[in-house]
Image (cartoon, rainbow, N blue to C red):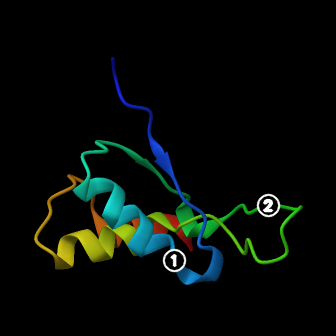
Amino acid sequence: MARPPFTSTDTYSQGLVDTLAALQHGVPTVDTSAGGLGGCPYANSATGNLATEDILWQLEGLGIRTGLNLTKLVEMSS
């Protein structure tokens, strides 16, 4: 059975840490949001979804290839 994707908001600025931990535990796919758009209207501290460009920057810095182009992604998110 396929594993569902991991989704993390950047609540308390923990999105990058949570997502990296999920990947280290075998989650093959993560859901992110271009520009960090989104969030939860019911939780004041849920400031937004994890920005795709942030996790991509982190993964590339760790030498993990994603197949995405960070420069083009940032341009698209602006």
Q: Amino acid at mark 1?
A: Gln
Q: Amino acid at mark 2?
A: Cys
Residue at screen point 15% across, 75% down: 62
Give residue 54's position: percent from left, percent from top.
42, 75
Residue at screen point 31% across, 44% down: 27
Q: Secondary structure at mark 1?
A: loop
C-alpha gap between disc 1 and disc 2: 15 Å
| Quarter of image, res 46 | bottom right
Front residue of 50/25: it is 25
Q: How many marks?
A: 2
Q: Which residue is mark 2?
A: 40
Seen from this angle, which residue lies furthest front?
A: 25
Residue at screen point 60% across, 64% down: 9
Give residue 70's position: percent from left, percent from top.
31, 69
Please give the label number shown on residue 14. Answer: 1
The quadrant of the image that shows the C terminus is bottom right
Q: Secondary structure at mark 2?
A: loop
Please give the label number shown on residue 75. Answer: none
Q: Which comes sooner in the sequence, label 1 or label 2?
A: 1
